[in-house]
Amino acid sequence: MGPEMAIHTEVLIAGAGPAGLMLAGDLAAAGVRCTVTERRTGESNLTRAFAVHARTLEELDARGVADELIARGTPVRGVRLLGQGELSLGDLPSRFPYTLVTPQYETERVLADRARQFGAEIREGAEVIGLRQHGDHVEVEVRRTGGDQQRTVRAAYVVGADGARSAVRSAVGLPFPGHAVVRSVMLADVPLAEKPADTIAANSTGDEFALIIPFGDGWYRIIGWDRHNQQPDDAPVGADEIRAVLGRVFGTDYGMGEPRWLSRFHSDERQVPQYRVGRVFLAGDAAHVHSPAGGQGMNTGIQDSANLGWKLAAVLAGWAGDGLLDTYQGERHPVGEQVLRSSSALLQGAMLRIPGPLKAGRSAAIRTLSRVRPLASRMTGAISGVAISYPAPRGAHPLTGRRVGDQRLADGRRLYEALRGGRFLLVTPDGTRHADGLLAEHGETVALAARARTSVLVRPDAYIGWASDDPAADPAGALARLVHAA
Ligand SMILES: Cc1cc2nc3c(=O)[nH]c(=O)nc-3n(C[C@H](O)[C@H](O)[C@H](O)COP(=O)(O)OP(=O)(O)OC[C@H]3O[C@@H](n4cnc5c(N)ncnc54)[C@H](O)[C@@H]3O)c2cc1C
C-alpha cells in the first residue's frame, strides 16, 4: 500500500462482516465498482451469530446462495421458549420454515465468495480512520492495520458496515444513544457427552439463563449468565462457571467436556438516529446493536444491505434519483427499532425473577402463547423476519411494501430464481411484456403459474414496490415514481 495513493472506487465499504459482504456482493453483481476495507487480516473464525432466519435465507435464495449455506448448517424447526411450550417454525409461509444453525464464519464465507466472484475488491489489513465529505465524493483515510502507512481513497459513496464501534459513524459525528442491558454473559464452545432433547435448548431460572446451540459435530456453543457472578468483560471464564450455570438451569451439565474457547461479553441496546449522512450510510451493527436474544443482529444487518444495495446501484447507474437513497432510512430504521424492542422483551423475560409460586403462571402463559395460533404466528413472523414490511404511500394497494412470497412462475422457474438477475420483476396476470424503456431495461415481466388478477412490481430485494388490480394500470409509471421516490 503506497502512502497517499488515491484509489477511486464507486462505493467504499468499511468492514467485511456479514453486512459489508452482502452489500459488496449486491453492488458488484450490479456492476458497481466497490472496495471493502477490512481491519482484520485472515478469515474470521469468530462465531458470534449462529441463527440464520427464514427472511435472510430468502434474500440469499434471491441471490442463488441459500442452498450452499443450508448445506453447511442444521435446520431447526422449533424453538422452546424458556423450557416451556415449543414455538413451531414449520408453518412459516416460506420455502425455509426453519432457522438455520450455522457458525457466522460460514455465512461470511458464502457472502465473501459471492462478492469476489462478481469482482468486489476485499482489502484486508486496511482500517478506515476518518473521512471528509465533498459535494460529489467522499475522501476516506485508510491506514494499514498495525502500521502507520496511510492513503486516501476517493469514493462516490461510503458505507460503514464496521460494527458496533464504527469508525465511520464517529467520523460523521453521529451519536449512538442507548444503554447496557446485560453484563458478564459467558460464551463457551464445549463438547457434550449427552445430547440435549431440544435442538436449541434454552432455559432460565430468573437468576441464571443458558442457551445451548449445536455446531452439528458434537460441539456446542453455550451462552450463559449468572446474576450472582457478574465480572468485567476481560475476566477469564472458567469451565466450572459454565458447568455450574448449566447444572442450575437444566439440572444437568450434559457431560460437558473441556472447552476449546471461552469468552465474556456485555450487550448494549443502541441505535443511531440517522442511517444516512450525505454520501455516507451505516448498516448492520454500526447502526444498531442489541443483545443476542432472538438471534437478530446479523440477520438485520444482512437485510439492511439487501435494502441499500439495489438503491445505490440504481442511483450510481443514473436511472434513479437521490431521494431513493433516503428511503433506506425510512424503511430500515423502523425495522432496527422494532428489533431492539423485541430482543429487549426476550432478554427481560429470561432475566425476570419470579417468586416460586408464580413460576407455574409464567410457564402456563408461555405454553398458551405458543399454542394460540395468531400469537404464535406473530412471534414466528417477527423472529424469522417474514413479517417485515415497509411503509407504503397513502392510497397504495395493500400489498405495497410487503415481502413477496415464493411462487411458481408460468415458465417453470420459482419467483426467487427469477430475482437472481438483481432486476425488478413485473408479475402480470398474463406475462405481457412492457415495452417501456425503464421496465424493459431494468426489469423482467413474468406471469405466475396459478391464475392471478393482481399485477405486482417486485423490487430486487423481494419486497413489493407497487401492485394494482386494474388491468389498465401503468407499471412503468409506477417504477419511475418508485425510483425517484416521488
Ligand atoms: C454471542 C452472540 C451471539 C449472536 N448470535 C446471533 C445470531 O444467532 N443471529 C444473528 O443474527 N446475530 C447474532 N449475533 C449478532 C451478530 O454477531 C452481529 O449482529 C453481526 O456480526 C453484525 O454484523 P456486521 O457485519 O454489522 O458487523 P461485524 O460482524 O461486527 O463486522 C464488522 C467488521 O468491520 C471490521 N472493522 C471494524 N472497524 C473497522 C474499521 N475502522 N475499518 C475497517 N474495518 C473495520 C471488523 O473487523 C469486522 O470484520 C450474536 C452476537 C453475539 C455476541
Image (spheres, rainbow, N blue to C red):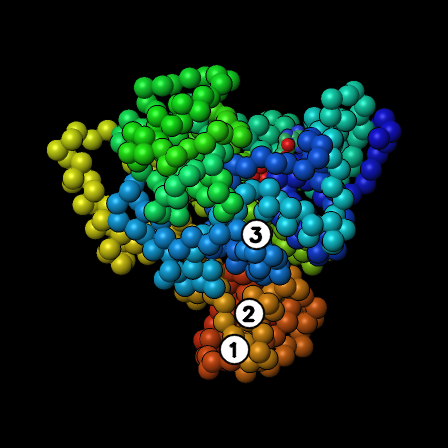
Say few, some or many: other residues with alpha carbon within 10 Å of mark 2 (under 14 / 14 to 19 / 20 or more): many
- The CA span between labels 3 and 2 is 24 Å
- The part of the image, by quadrant, that contains residue 266 is top left
Asked whether the beta carbons under mark 1 and mark 2 sit within 8 Å of each other, the answer is yes
Q: Is residue 346 left or right of residue 337?
A: left
The quadrant in which the N terminus is found is top right
What residue is rendered at 56% in x and 42% in y?
A: 104
Say few, some or many: other residues with alpha carbon within 10 Å of mark 1 (under 14 / 14 to 19 / 20 or more): many
SS for dot 1:
loop
**Camera-side residue of 171 and 268:** 268
What residue is rendered at 39% in x and 48% in y?
A: 199
Q: Is residue 320 visible?
A: yes
Which residue lies under the disc numbered 2? 415
Q: Is residue 291 visible?
A: no
Asked whether the beta carbons under mark 3 and mark 2 sit within 8 Å of each other, the answer is no
Which residue lies under the disc numbered 1? 448
Say whether disc 1 or disc 3 marks the residue closer to the N-terminus.
3
Question: What percent of the width, then of the height, locates residue 435?
Answer: 67, 77
Which residue lies under the disc numbered 3? 72
Q: Is residue 475 above or below residue 234?
A: below
Amino acid carrying label 3: it is Arg
Q: Ligand 1 closer than 8 Å to the CB at disc 2?
A: no
Say whether disc 3 or disc 2 marks the residue closer to the N-terminus.
3
Amino acid carrying label 1: it is Leu
**Nearer to us: label 1 or label 3:** 3
Q: Quadrant of ligand 1?
A: top right
What residue is rendered at 38% in x and 18% in y?
A: 230
Amino acid carrying label 2: it is Leu
- The part of the image, by quadrant, that contains residue 381 is bottom left
Q: Is residue 15 left or right of residue 101?
A: right
Question: What percent of the width, then of the height, locates residue 469?
Answer: 45, 75
